[in-house]
Structure formats: structure tokens, C-alpha cells
Image (tube, rainbow, N blue to C red):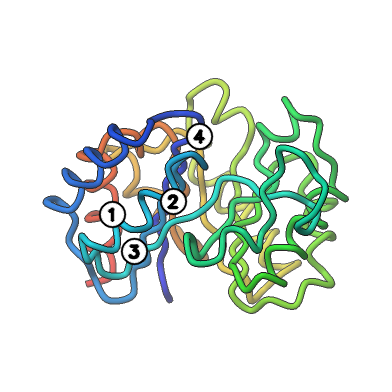
């Protein structure tokens, strides 16, 4: 089973800090067959980072956008359409709980963003949480995309900075697989190098979705290398 480590920087790091992070990460990261590493910087960094990361020659590594417009290119001031990310990223994070909580995004917004992303030839990373998992999963029923990734991230784990217990994560992932059996599912919520082992060992888990720990190159590389070791 292919594994993923996905880092989400959220609203952090400008161009210089981002390049310093990647320079440090490149020295620590050990590519492993079967492991795909994805990092989502801020939108403002993507143009410069696409060239910079390409020059570093990182293997089995991709960039992601943290969000995307639910509309195509056109008269939508301030929006970034999926087509505009082509050539910069391979993945797009969609439906994060912070987008729903702070920006009042709906399930229909999520569905529209997924459609725009797939039409642009990019891979959606769709965020799911409780107690709205079934509604969120239903929005995926008509999506024709073999590569779509589901990221399960309980809101409490993100807000309280306390990871959900592995047995509860296993139950949630099993439920998701009953609805979408062929989609890879990653877990996100207060993951660190010293606790990631117990989550990547869970059956049906295809990797991890990392927030705070992705902001430090050393801790993120340690997580990547631990997931890589689990494949050997």
C-alpha cells in the first residue's frame, strides 16, 4: 500500500523562510519507494517554491495548494482557480475544518472545489471530520478521480492539540473505508515524531496529515523517515 506524509503549513512562512525550510529538509529527507511526501505552503510562496524545489531534485515529493476557488477562471476577485495551480502543484487540500469554521464553507463549496480540482488534472486531498463525516463523504460519490485522498482529522485533535486515541482513529477509518473502500485515508491531528508510530501502524491507514510539526523541517523529516521505515 502506498503511504503519504502530507504537511500543511497553514498561514505561516514567507518566501525566504520557506526556502530555508526546504534547504534544511533536503539534507534530512530519505526518499523511500512507496512513500509520497507532500507539502502545502502558503499560496504566496508557490510560484517561487515550485522552481526552488525543482532545483533541489527531491524524489517522490510534491507541492500542494492549501485551498482552491470553487469557480473557474474569470471575474472572481481574490480567488485562485484550479487551472492557475497547474505546473505549480500536484495536490490541493479541500474542505479543511478551519475553512468551514472560519470561512463558513459548505459541503456544496467542497463539492465544487473538488470538481474544479479534478477537471484541472490535480489530486484533491479532501478533509473529513466528525460528526459530519457521512455528509462530507457523500459529496465524493460522483467524483471520478482514482487518486483522490481522504484526510480524516477530528476537530478536537486540532483545536485542543491532543491526538485522538488510536483505537478511535481505527474505528473512524474503518467507517470511511466502508463508504469509500478504494480511497486512501490519512490521519491528521496533533502528530509529532514521538507519537506517529502508533498511527502509521494502524490497519487501513495510508499515511498522516501533519500540521504544526510540518513547520519545522527537522520534525517533519523525522516523521517522513519514520513512515518510510515502516515500509521497509
- Point out the tag, 1 or 3, that comes first from the N-terminus: 1
Q: Gap between marks 2 and 1, in whole Å?
A: 9 Å
Percent across and percent down for residue 8 are 46, 42
- Point out the tag, 1 or 4, that comes first from the N-terminus: 4
Residue 26 seen in the current view: yes
- Point out the tag, 2 or 3, that comes first from the N-terminus: 2
Q: Which mark is residue 135?
A: none
Are circles 2 and 1 on residues that touch, CB within 8 Å? no
Q: Name the residue under label 2.
A: 47
Percent across and percent down for residue 179 are 76, 67
The quadrant of the rendering that contains the N terminus is: bottom left
Q: Gap between marks 2 and 3, in whole Å?
A: 16 Å
Q: Which mark is residue 52?
A: 1
Q: Gap between marks 3 and 4, in whole Å?
A: 19 Å
Mark 1: few/some/many CA within 10 Å (<14, 14-19, 20+): some
In-front residue for pair 32/59? 59
- 97 displayed left or right of 6: right
Q: Gap between marks 1 and 3, in whole Å?
A: 13 Å
Mark 3: few/some/many CA within 10 Å (<14, 14-19, 20+): some
In-front residue for pair 52/38? 52
Q: Mark 3 points at which residue?
A: 61
Q: Mark 4 points at which residue?
A: 10
Q: Gap between marks 1 and 4, in whole Å?
A: 20 Å
What residue appears at the point 68 percent right and 76 percent down from the top-left corner?
A: 145
SS at circle 2: helix
Q: How many numbered circles are shown?
A: 4
- Which quadrant holds residue 97? top right
Mark 2: few/some/many CA within 10 Å (<14, 14-19, 20+): some
Q: Gap between marks 4 and 2, in whole Å?
A: 17 Å
Amino acid at each position: 500500500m502506498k503511504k503519504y506524509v502530507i504537511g500543511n503549513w497553514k498561514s505561516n512562512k514567507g518566501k525566504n523562510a520557506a526556502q530555508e525550510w526546504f534547504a534544511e529538509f533536503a539534507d534530512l529527507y530519505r526518499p523511500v519507494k512507496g512513500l509520497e511526501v507532500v507539502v502545502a505552503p502558503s499560496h504566496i510562496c508557490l510560484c517561487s517554491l515550485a522552481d526552488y524545489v525543482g532545483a533541489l531534485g527531491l524524489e517522490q515529493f510534491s507541492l500542494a495548494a492549501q485551498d482552491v476557488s470553487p469557480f473557474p477562471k474569470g471575474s472572481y476577485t481574490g480567488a485562485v482557480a484550479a487551472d492557475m495551480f497547474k505546473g505549480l502543484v500536484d495536490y490541493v487540500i479541500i474542505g479543511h475544518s478551519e475553512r468551514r469554521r472560519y470561512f463558513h464553507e459548505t459541503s456544496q463549496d467542497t463539492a465544487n472545489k473538488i470538481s474544479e480540482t479534478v477537471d484541472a488534472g490535480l489530486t484533491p486531498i479532501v478533509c473529513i471530520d466528525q460528526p459530519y463525516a457521512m455528509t462530507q463523504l457523500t459529496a465524493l460519490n460522483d467524483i471520478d478521480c482514482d487518486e483522490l485522498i481522504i484526510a480524516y482529522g477530528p476537530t478536537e485533535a486540532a483545536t485542543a492539540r491532543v491526538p485522538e486515541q488510536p483505537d478511535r482513529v481505527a474505528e473512524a477509518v474503518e467507517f470511511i473505508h466502508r463508504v469509500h473502500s478504494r480511497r486512501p485515508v490519512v490521519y491528521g491531528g496533533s502528530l509529532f515524531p514521538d507519537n506517529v508510530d502508533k498511527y502509521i501502524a494502524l490497519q487501513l491507514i495510508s499515511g498522516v496529515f501533519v500540521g504544526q510539526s510540518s513547520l519545522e523541517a527537522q520534525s517533519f523529516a523525522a516523521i517522513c523517515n519514520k513512515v518510510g521505515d515502516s515500509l521497509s
